[in-house]
Image: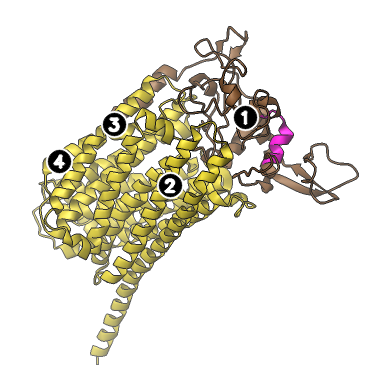
Amino acid sequence: MSSSTQGLSSVATGSAPAEVISSKEIDASCRWPLLVFFSSAAFWFLFSTVLGLINSIKLHSPNFLAHCPWLTYGRLRPAQTDSFVYGFAAPAAFGVTLWLFCRLGRTRLIAPGFLAMAAKIWNIGVLVGAVGIMAGDGAGFEWLNFPRYASLILFIAYVFIGIWAVLTFKVRQQDQLFPSQWYLLAALFWFAWIYSAANLLLVFSPVRGVVQLCVNAWYASNLLNVWLSVVGVGVIFYFIPKLISRPLHSYYLSLVAFWGIALFGGWSFINTNAPLPSWIPALSSVFTLMMILPIVCVALNVHGTLSGDFKSVRTNPILSFIVFGAFSFLIAQSMNVLSAFRPLNEKLFFTYFTAGQAHWLLQGFFASVAFGAIYYIAPRVIGVDLVQQKSIRRHLLVFVAGVIIYGLALTLGGIVQGANLNNASVPFDEVIKGTLPFLHASTIGSLLLVIAGLLFAVNLSSLCFNCVWGMGKQLVKKGEERP
Amino acid sequence: MSLSWLGLVLGPQLQLGSQAPEMNDKTGQLYPQARAGTAQQGREVYRANGCFSCHSQQVRPQGFGADIERGWGVRRTVAADYLFDSPLMVGSQRIGPDLANIGLRQPDANQLLVHLYNPQITMATGQKSNMPSYPYLFEKRKLGRTISPDALKFPSGFAPEAGYEIVPRVEARVLAEYLRSLHAEVPLIELPSITPGTNAVAETNAPAAAPTNAAQSSATNSPAK
C-alpha cells in the first residue's frame, strides 16, 4: 500500500521531488492487477473461442446441441461476441494501458490493490453477463447484449479502473508525451462515454423506435472502430519501435491517424437503405469512406518504422504478433470502407462478410496485438525469465492460421452469399447451400483458435508456475543457508 | 469526440424521437398501432432466444437488393413501422430469411409452431432448412382421453409416435403470435405498396417458400425457409 500513498501525495503537492524509479520497480508495482487482467483475458478468450467453435458447427449442422435452451445459437452467438469484447479485449486493454502509463510516465502504479479488486469486479460483471445472455436475459442489442444488471457491475468496475488509470497518468514524472499515451488516455474517456451513453439510451431508458437502430450502430462503430482501434494502434505505435529499437517513423502521421479515427470511426454499420430518413445512412457512408485517411496513415507509419528491419518480424515472435495485428487492422478497416460503397453495401450487408469484418478486427487485429503486448509485459511484471520463444512461436502459428482460415472463409462466404441473396432466381435454400463449404472451413479456423487460446493459457500459467517455483527454490536455499 | 454522437444519436433523436402514429388516408386508421399483449410477450421470447442473430426485420426498396422480389415485403420498411418496438431487433444477418412480413407470408399459427418444432417438416420437398429446431419450446405429452385443443397438427408422416402429442409451451404460443403480428404492408402516402399481380416481379417470384404458385404465395406459403 505504500506505493499508493506515495502516488496520492504527489498528486496533492503537484511537484514531488523527481525520484528515479527503476523499470524493475515500476513493473513490480503493476504485478497483481495486471495478473488479474491478463489471466482473466486468457480465460475469456478460451471461453469465447469455445463458444465460437460450437456456433460455427451449428451454422452447418443446426441441430447440434439444439435441445438445450442455454446453448441455442441465438444466445451463444451474442455470448461469444460480448464475452470476447468485455471479457478478453477490455481487460487486456486495461492491463496494457496501465503498464504503458507507468512505464512511459516513469511512475509506479497507483493503488494496485484497488485496481486488482476492480479487475475482479469487472470479471464478475462479465460472468454475470455471459450467464445472463445464456439464461435468456440478453438485452437484444449487438455488442451490447449483456443484461442491465451486468452492465451496471461493469460500469462500476470501470469507474474505478478509469479513475486510477487517469491518476496514474497524472502523476507521471516524464512530462513529454509519446503518441501511445494520448491514444490510450483518449480511449479511457471514450469507453466511459460510449458505454454509459449507449446503455442509458438503449437499456435503461430506451429511445423510441428506429432511433435505437442509430444508437446501436453508433455504439458498435465507436466500440470497434474507435475504442478498440485507438487502443490497438496506440499499442502498435509503442511496441514496434520498442522491439526493434528505432524511433516511431512519424509523430504527425500518428496525430492525423488519431484524429481521423476519432472523427470518422464512429459512423459505420448502418445499411444504406435502413428504415431511416436517408440523410442518416448517407452521412454514415460518407464518414465511413473517410476512414481511408487514418488507415493510410497507420499503414505508412508502421511501414516507415519497420522499413529496413523487416527480418526482425520473422525472428521475433512478439513483433510478429504486433505486425500481424497491424496488417489485420488494415484488412478489417478496408472491409469496412468497402462496404460503405452503395453497390457493395447492397451485396454485403446482411451477410457473413460483416461477421468476417468483425472477426478480422477483434481476433486478427486486437487479439494479436494484445497477445504480443502481454507476452512482453507479463514476464516483466511477474519478475521471471521471458517466455520461451518456441512456445510463443507455436501459439503464433496456430493463431495466425486460425485467424486467416476463419477470416477468409467468412469473407469469401459472405461475398458468395450476398451475390446469391440479391438474385431472386436463386431459392433461399440454394443460398444456404452455397455458403456451406465456407462454413465447414470456418469450423477448422475456429478449432485452431480454440487451440491458440489453450496455448496462450498454458504459456501464461507456466510463467506463474515459474514464479512460484522460483520463490520456493529461494526459500529452500535460505533455509539451507541457515545452519 | 462527440461528433458522431451529434450525427447518429442527437440528430435522429431530434427528428424521430417524438414520432407519433398518424392517420392513414388509405385505411382510415391510425398507423402504426401497438402490438397486442401476447405479441409483445412473444417479442420477449424472440429477444431471449436471439432470433435476431440470424433473421433481419427490414425490407430494402425495390432496385436495391432482391428483398421485394423474394416476397419478403410489398414495400420497403420505414421508421414508422418500428415505432412501438423496444428493444428494436432489426438484425444485421440473413442466415435465415427476413421476417419483417412473416405474418403476411404465414398467418397460420399452427404452421409457424410446426416450423419452430422442426423446421424440416414445413419445407417443400427436396429442400432443407438451416434453422435449428426448438424442442424446448414444446412439451411431448402422453395422450389423454382426447387430444389437447392446442396440440400441433402435423402433416401426414410427421406426427409423433402413437399415444403422444406435441403441445406448445406458453413461450412458443406467444412467439407465434409475435411472428403473426409482423407485417409492414400498410400503404403509406410516400410509399404505395407493390401489390402482387400489378408487378412483373410477381411472375418471377419463386421464393423458396412456394415454388408452385408465386401469386398466391402469401396465403399458401410455408414459413420462412
Q: In 3D space, how far apart are the residues under numbered discs 2 and 4 (Cα atoms)?
A: 32 Å
Q: In 3D space, how far apart are the residues under numbered discs 1 and 3 (Cα atoms)?
A: 35 Å
Residue type, label 2? Leu
User: Residue A460: in sight, yes or no?
Assistant: yes
Question: Residue at image x 38%, y 35%?
Answer: A219
Range of the magenta residues? Answer: B106-115
Residue A45, by quadrant, is bottom left
Question: Residue at image x 41%, y 64%?
Answer: A454
Q: Chain of mark 2?
A: A
Residue type, label 1? Ile
Q: Residues within 10 Å of mark 3 (few under 14, many from 20)?
A: many
Residue type, label 4? Leu
**Chain A representation colour:** yellow
Q: Is residue A26 above or below residue B163?
A: below
Residue denoted by label 2:
A410
Closer mark to the observer between disc 3 and disc 4: 3
Which residue, as the protein is rendered here, is positioned at the far right? Answer: B145
- Give the letter of the brown chain: B
Circles 1 and 3, Cβ within 8 Å, touching? The answer is no
Q: Chain of mark 4?
A: A
Residue denoted by label 1:
B102
Residue A253, labelled with which disc? 4
Residue denoted by label 3:
A289
Dot 3 falls on a residue whose secondary structure is: helix
Q: Residues within 10 Å of mark 4 (few under 14, many from 20)?
A: some
Q: Residues within 10 Å of mark 1 (few under 14, many from 20)?
A: many
Q: In 3D space, how far apart are the residues under numbered discs 3 and 4 (Cα atoms)?
A: 19 Å
Residue type, label 3? Leu
